[in-house]
Image: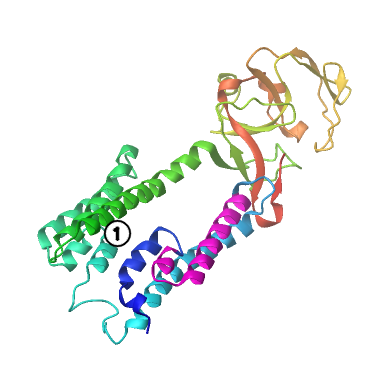
Amino acid sequence: MSNVNLDKDPWLAVNLSMFFPGIGQLYGGNLWRGIIFLGGQSWLLSMALWNIFAARGNTVNGLFYLGISVIIYLVNILDSHLGVYLPRTGYISEKIPRKHKNVWFAVFVSRVLPGLGHLYLQKSIIGLGLLTASLLFLKLDDIFTPLLIITPLLTAIATYHTYIVFPRSHSDFQRSLIATMAGFVFFVSLLSNYFPQWLDQRFEQFIIPSESMQPTLQVGDRVFVEKSPDYVPQNGDIVVFTPSEAIKETDPEFADYYIKRVIGIPGDVVSVDNQRVYVNDRPLNEPYIAEPPRYEFSPQFITKNSYLVLGDNRNNSLDSHFWGLLPREVIVGKAYKIGWPPNRIQSLK
């Protein structure tokens, strides 16, 4: 039996592994298992993010890697506990400490849901107060975004206070340790709360509602749109935009979003003649269109902060040849990938 493991606490290992797989194993003295968990989880998460969000990534593979990473995270928590607990079975009889209270188990359940650790320590009033507040703000922060900071703050406070009220003496080092841990709990919880909003500010998904972009995009395709205030549309880009005033005036049943291909940028002159699109008097090579346009379009100069956009299904698309130029301010972003369904996944760049 290892003397090192006898000095370790299995529930402290669990708390450390909740931050990231492998940390609890390293604390417990299981060096190689810790390195494998750390490296494996880092690789899985990087592959998941790349496959889901990169233009050439496969969304199905990304979801697979993400699912495996969740399983690894849960297995890591169990492994970190058993890696310290099993060598001590002659000294600790309770896997879940009930008779002999464990401060790190109290910290663990406080991180799962603030208030549970205090209830475990029979601090009923503060436990019920924290539990009620946590459940309340979990509902409210879905409605009021600024409240997203409250739940991480409650979790950090509950984590620290659970340790402090535990009936035993605390050294300065232990107080520093739990204060540091509470700080990390706050940071990680805050990050997980705001990460979806950060993604929403940079990426958006758009489901193709019509046949106007066939054959490039089919009805039901889910496209990923990259949003950036610095984005400058270029010829050939597929852009998602909200209806301009001209669209609203010409189409009383206008949709919330549209998707078309940029054909002309500021300074260009675009025309359609003899079933060909011309940009600055040069015919476009357009292998992506469903069929040649059967309409004529007089030369149109593209003014500053405006774009001319057409659907790839030229003869079945309400676009700039119908309602005019598109103002820059209504463009949401560039569609760069078909992310779903699986048989349609492909880059649009």
Of residue 166 and residue 171, the one placed in the foreground of this image is 171
Circle 1: element type: helix
Q: Is residue 171 left or right of residue 15?
A: left
Which residue occupies the extreme left position in the image? Answer: 125
Query: Residue shown at 13%/56% (left/top)?
Result: 126
| Whole-percent x, y for residue 283 in the image | 87, 23
From the viewer's perspective, tell me whether residue 306 is left or right of residue 263. left
Q: Quadrant of residue 284?
A: top right
For this orientation, the residue located farthest to the front is: 3
- Locate the N terminus by quadrant: bottom left
Whether residue 24 appears in magenta in the rendering, the answer is: yes
Observer-nearest of 76 and 129: 76
Q: Amino acid at mark 1?
A: Arg
Residue depicted at x 59% and y 26%: 251
Q: Does residue 43 appear in this view?
A: yes
Q: Which residue is mark 1?
A: 111
User: What count of labels does the image hold?
Assistant: 1
Image: 291 above or below 279: below
Q: The magenta stretch spans which residues?
A: 23-52
Q: Residue at x 27, y 84 (%)?
A: 91
Residue 64 lies in quadrant: bottom right
Mark 1, Cα crowd under 10 Å, few <14 / some 14-19 / many 20+, is many
- Specify whether 172 is left or right of 25: left
Q: Is residue 110 left or right of residue 258?
A: left
Height in image: 192 above or below 40? above
State the predominant SS element of the stretch in magenta.
Answer: helix
Q: Give the position of the C terminus as an image quadrant.
A: top right
| Residue 67 visible in the snapshot | no
Residue 347 at x, y = what percent? 71, 45
User: Is residue 72 rendered magenta in the image?
Assistant: no
Query: Residue 238, image x and y in percent?
Result: 68, 34
Instruction: Identify which residue is drawn at 21% across, 57% down.
Output: 131
